[in-house]
Amino acid sequence: MGVLFLVAMAGELFRTVRADIVTYAVPVFFGVGAILLYVMLCKSCLVPKYIAVWGLIAALAVMANMFVPMSELKPLLALPIIANEIYLGIYLLIKGFRKGTPANV
C-alpha cells in the first residue's frame, strides 16, 4: 500500500512540474528566440521594418502571457505572433528577402 501511494504522489508531482514548465518555460524560450529573430530581421533590413517591429511587440506579448491570471486573455495575447508569423511567411513566399542589404550587419 505504501509503494502505490508513493507512485501516485510522484505522478502528481510530475504532472504539477510539467504544468509549471508549460506555463513558464515555454513562453520564455519561445519569446527569447522570437526577439532574437526579429531584432536580426530589423537590423539586417531583409524585410520591411514594420514586420520586424510587429514581431518584436508580439514576442513581448507572448512573454507577458505567463503573467496574465485570466485564462480568457491568454489566447488573445498569442494572436499577434500567430498573425505575424503567417504574414511573414506569405510575404517571404511572394516577395522574398530584399536585395542589396548591407552584408556586414
Image (tube, rainbow, N blue to C red):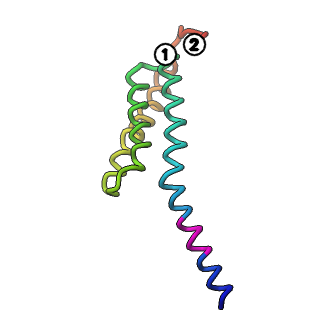
* Quadrant including the N terminus: bottom right
Q: Position of residue 67 (x, y in %)?
A: 39, 49
Magenta region includes residue 87: no
Residue located at (50% from left, 17% from top): 43
Residue located at (41% from left, 34% from top): 84
Residue located at (53% from left, 50% from top): 25
Magenta region includes residue 12: yes
Lateral position of residue 83 relative to residue 101, left or right:
left
Tell me the crowding category of disc 2: few under 14, some 14 to 19, or many 20 or more residues within 10 angstroms, Cα based. few
Tell me the crowding category of disc 1: few under 14, some 14 to 19, or many 20 or more residues within 10 angstroms, Cα based. some
Q: Position of residue 28 (x, y in %)?
A: 51, 44
The residue that mark 1 highlights is 45
Lateral position of residue 14 relative to residue 54, left or right:
right
Lateral position of residue 82 relative to residue 105, left or right:
left
Q: Circles 1 and 2: CB distance less than 8 Å? A: yes
Q: Position of residue 76 (x, y in %)?
A: 33, 47
The residue that mark 2 highlights is 105
Q: Residue 59, relative to residue 100: is it above or below?
A: below
| Magenta part, dominant SS | helix
- Which amino acid does the dot numbered 1 rest on? Cys
Q: CA distance from mark 1 to mark 2?
A: 9 Å
Q: Residue 9, relative to residue 90: is it above or below?
A: below
Helix, strand or loop under label 2: loop
Q: Which residues are magenta?
A: 10-16
Q: Position of residue 63 (x, y in %)?
A: 44, 42
Q: Residue 42, relative to residue 102: is it above or below?
A: below
